[in-house]
Amino acid sequence: MITIICAGSRGDFQPYIALAQQLKKLGKDVKISGSSEVESLVRSYGIEYFPVEVDFEKLGVDPNIIKESQSADNPLKMLLTFNKMKKYGIKIAEETYASLEGSELIVYHPGCTMGYFAAQEMGIPSVLATPFPMHKTDEYLSVVTYGKAKPTKLNKKISYKMVQSMLWLASSSTVKGHWKKHFKRLPKDFSSPYERISTEHPAVVSCSNFVFPRPKDWNENIHQNGYWFVEENIEYIPSKELLDFLSKGEKPVYIGFGSVFNSEQKDELVSLIIDAMKKCKKRGIISGMGKIDNLPDNLIAVDSIPHTWLFNNVSVVCHHGGAGTTAAGFRAGVPSVIIPFSNDQFAWAHRAYDLGVGAKPIYKKDLTSNKLAEGIKFALTKEIVNNAKVLAQNIATENGAIYCAKVIASMINK
């Protein structure tokens, strides 16, 4: 049994579901372990799941800390927030370790380093599976500072130290607490494992080489050959209301902010969107904000809809810059307008602009209806539209999930 251990929200799990799908096609038994909140999502793809209870309310997590994590707009804030969150990880450590027992190989998200040390303790191989490039390189800045700092040699070095330190901070206390309680000691060589890459501990990365090319100075055992896209097993059937809306005019603009959407700001945000769409004279689909009353005829509100279907039916994707949503927009070949809230979202916003497939980033704190309208207009210029189509064609030549699944499977076949 291969166990994939992951953390985060729905969007964070989707690349790992894609890996699990391809491993099953290779004839491997595989399960995913993580928050009980995404159990139904994972199981809907026919993937075995081991739920770990992560009820923030039961754990006594201060709601303000969660809000801080969703609005950390600079590296210092990110570090402070990660430091506050780390103590809660200790409380879910036992269930997490139990989910790994009986595995013959562990694949782990960089925020779940228990996977690395558990594999070491059990005498089995492990694979670091990361949803973005995170290994040090002299070629570009890491995702925590890309677009926000000058790409000097020193800044590049600092930026990778920073992203790895934040991820290590988030999971090291969990590992430390569990080992001291159950083994009365620390794990062997207890320190950040991210750069310990070898044939026995390779890394796989979900990223297109047409977005961030694989650096030439990486260890040969770091594998990157495209995004890990989920294969939908059920054809999505849209509502009659949505089909009617789509048929009544030009392709609309998608607007959604995923898991970072704060319902307390709903009225303010909806009002801003209505004004922006009026100013740019476009139709729009507002996603993931619940029921919205009294919308003008040029707008419709929808619940969560698979990006694989929806993004093929819109002209622009306006979103928060989550890695998965960004990748889905690139894959669909439509321009982006990214409004980053926190963490790596700034990097994807700046990268879209640098690649010429999106508007200049609009930071959440600077968002106005005028800026959103201008961003949409810019994204729809001929050059940006054409660039987005070419990027999608290039991404379609890659097979990231298949390629990386084969790397993982080869660890068992040795």
Image (spheres, rainbow, N blue to C red):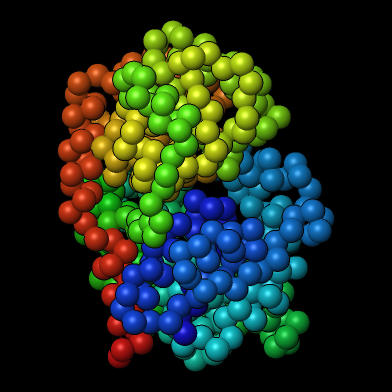
Q: Residue at x 59, y 32 (%)?
A: 289
Q: Is residue 402 above or below residue 267?
A: below
Q: Is residue 205 visible?
A: yes
How many marks overall?
0
Please determine whether, in this image, residue 344 is positioned above or below residue 176: above
Of all residues, the one furthest to the front in this rendering is 240
Which quarter of the figure has residue 335? top left
Compared with residue 371, is residue 175 higher up or lower down, i.e. above or below?
A: below
Q: Residue at x 17, y 38 (%)?
A: 390
Residue 352: which quarter of the image?
top left
Q: Position of residue 171 (x, y in %)?
A: 61, 65
**Which residue is nearer to you in this view: 292 or 331?**
292
Q: How far across and how far down the image is residue 378, in percent?
A: 31, 18
Above or below, comparing residue 114 to residue 102 in the picture: above
Residue appearing at x 33%, y 33% in the figure: 313
- Near-viewer residue (313 or 393): 313
Image location (x, y in percent) of residue 272: 56, 16
Q: Quick one: 252 or 79, which is closer to the camera?
A: 252
Q: Is residue 353 left or right of residue 143?
A: left
Q: Which residue lies most toward the top here? A: 279
**Residue in the picture at 74% in, 58% down:** 55
Can residue 149 be seen in the rendering of this structure? no
Coordinates of residue 84 in the picture (x, y in percent):
71, 52
Indicate the quadrant containing the C terminus: top left, top right, bottom left or bottom right. Answer: bottom left
Instruction: Please indicate whether residue 47 sits to the left or right of residue 235 in the image.
Output: right
